[in-house]
Amino acid sequence: MSDLKIHTYPMNIGDWRSGTRKLSLTEKGAYKELCDQYYQDNGVDWDETECFRICSALTPEEQIAVQNVLAKKFHKTGNGYTHTGMETRIAAITKTSERFHERAKKAANAMHKAKSGDASSTATSSASGTATSGATSSASSKRQARLRACHPESINHKEELGAHTPNSSVGRKRTKKPPKPVAPPPSAACPVPPELRKLIADDPAFGPEWCVSYLDPCRLDGDRLMARFHSAVAQLRRCPHLAPFEIVPPA
């Protein structure tokens, strides 16, 4: 007996009609009830009383119809009744069900392995990326520490100037080389006296590039020029040796 619970089964109309042609209407109803129950329990522990209950045979005529069906269509055994045709169909249904079950089990296992592999590769990639990022950050911090140890004055000066110094590289990564200093054309008016400009250009805290960026109006115009000029004045007034010079705003 199979453990499979069959809730539906194929029924050939031609076979049914040819197989029940000699049965009465009552016997056909009893046979149909017995067939439905046979697919559930394979006729195990059947006797006449159980068959009467299955078919709801209450009257003597109905019980006689059940007895006739059992005699014509079923075979009595030691533990119930058997039916050769239905046994063949039950075996075929069981085999097909087991094949589909194995196929579904393999598909589920393959899907589970694929998900486990994706999760493992994601975790590995994340761990590798975190390690690489940590190593890069650590190396950058070490380079900054060495730079501060070797050139403390230069680093402190750049941090003091901050955003006012165009060549400052503190806190950002330089992507391209700074432009070479370009001397202003003779026709450009400079608001700083030549003597003061030369002192600023020779001063290691400023240099010629600073003069080109902050003092030469030929590179700027309008509001940008005035903003840059006032920033330059604020920085120059911090230097005592440049205080005697008068700086006027550009026209």
Image (cartoon, rainbow, N blue to C red):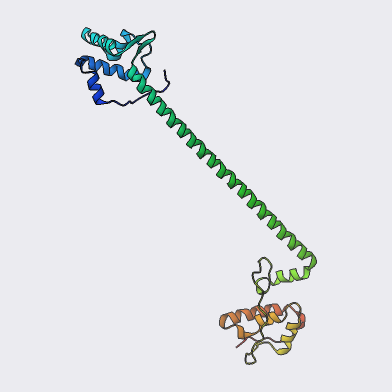
Residue at 43% x, 28% y: name it.
98
* Quadrant of res 206: bottom right
- Examine the rendering and report whether any part of residue 241 can be seen: yes
Compared across the picture, whether 109 is left or right of 131 comes to left
Q: Measured along the vertical axis of the image, is residue 55 above or below residue 144?
A: above
- Examine the rendering and report whether any part of residue 58 can be seen: no
Q: How many numbered marks appear? A: 0
Judging depth in this view, the residue of 44 and 123 nearest the camera is: 44
Residue at 76% x, 65% y: name it.
147
Judging depth in this view, the residue of 235 and 48 nearest the camera is: 48
Task: Spot the residue most to the bottom.
Answer: 187
Judging depth in this view, the residue of 92 and 5 nearest the camera is: 92
Q: Measured along the vertical axis of the image, is residue 102 above or below residue 218?
A: above
Task: Spot the residue most to the right.
Answer: 150
Residue 107 locus on image (x, y percent): 48, 37
Query: Image quadrant for the N terminus?
Result: top left
Residue 151 locus on image (x, y percent): 78, 68
Compared across the picture, whether 237 is left or right of 103 comes to right
Residue at 56% x, 83% y: name it.
222
Residue at 69% x, 55% y: name it.
135
* Quadrant of res 188: bottom right
* Quadrant of res 12: top left
Query: Image quadrant for the C terminus?
Result: bottom right
Residue 212 locus on image (x, y percent): 66, 82
